[in-house]
Image (cartoon, helix red, strand yellow):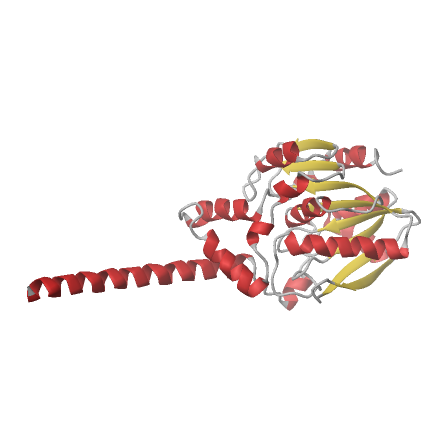
Amino acid sequence: MSNNKSKIGKVLAITAGVTLAAGATYCASCGYIFSKVFKRNKKVEYLAFSNSLPNKSINDEWFENCDKEDVEILSYDGLKLHGTVVKNKSYNWVICLHAYNFYGTQILDVARNFHEHGYNCLIVDQRAHGKSEGDYTTLGWKEHYDVIDWIDYVLKNNPNASIVLHGMSLGAATVLNTTGEYLPQNVKCAVSDCAYTSIESLLKYQIKKYLKLPLGALVPGVNILCKSKANFSLYEGNSLQQVKQSSTPTLFLHGELDAFVPFEMVFDLFYACTAEKELCTFQESKHAESFLDKNYFEKVFNFVDQFVK
């Protein structure tokens, strides 16, 4: 009898040890993903880095000589958010929203082309990026409330403004989340370039592809950290649900060679959108590189010009 008890005790001890080890591994994995994805560690050299790709010299010369000023607003949760206004003699405005791990003036192709098309440009550093405050990105969720504040900023200074929203990747998700809210009539249309359907779907895809782990097993654990450290639920960030209640005309763009955000997501977003909409894909473009296609801005302005005079 005592031998049996001893064997049972050993089995329980081994089981407990395995369970604790598995739990520790799970927690460590969730912590790694949260820190890697949501925690932002900005460095001085990061702010100085410029990557305008093939058009760098053109963009740099334009930005050096344009009429511009730094502006700042306070977010609803107390962060100082930075933007750069490039001025034009026009009532037309574009709010430019950058991709993940970039900042507003790092890639200037969108702003420059809109400026040459007669627009004032508000180039935004999204929270926890560039010169804006914040320790955590929320991948487009809290950021879309920031965009509503930026819209208010434009309208306080320019009540008759016609506003276009343009975003890439993180910026595109931010744009789509914004269109799901009640917006002033001054917001005429939106351009979403390589957005993801939801934070949950993107994380599941990334975990499966890069970590080779079970599809969604880590997401709930990561969400606990999102709630405790960044004060939001990653399940809130659902652009697919937001576009279902949008009334803002939207152009959906996506590169067909995108390996970071699944190309198929653009179709889910497009068909779910309840507003007037168009879809354009770029056969040779990777993630957030469609703007390098020679037809990109022709497609953008063919759409935008329908709604902004």
Is residue 172 or residue 49 the one in the foreground?
Answer: 172
Q: Is residue 170 above or below residue 274?
A: below
Q: Quadrant of residue 267?
A: top right
Task: Tell me the quadrant of the picture where the N terminus can be found.
Answer: bottom left
Q: Is residue 267 above or below residue 136?
A: above
Is residue 112 or residue 239 the one in the foreground?
Answer: 239
Q: What residue occupies the far front of the structure in this picture? A: 1
Question: What residue lies at 70% left-to-right and 44% top-to-bottom?
Answer: 180
Left or right position of 148 against 213: right
Question: What residue lies at 62% left-to-right and 67% top-to-bottom?
Answer: 43
Count how many numbered circles sit on residues in the image. Answer: 0
Is residue 36 or residue 181 the one in the foreground?
Answer: 181
Query: What is the x, y in percent for residue 270?
Result: 65, 34
Q: Is residue 250 above or below residue 7?
A: above
Question: What residue lies at 17% left-to-right and 65% top-to-bottom?
Answer: 9
Left or right position of 13 against 118: left
Q: What residue occupies the far right of the structure in this picture? A: 89
Query: What is the x, y in percent for residue 41?
Result: 59, 65
Visible in this render: residue 8? yes
Visible in this render: residue 106? no
Left or right position of 89 against 272: right
Q: Quadrant of residue 138?
A: bottom right
Query: What is the x, y in percent for residue 268?
Result: 60, 34
Task: Tell me the quadrant of the picture where the C terminus can be found.
Answer: top right
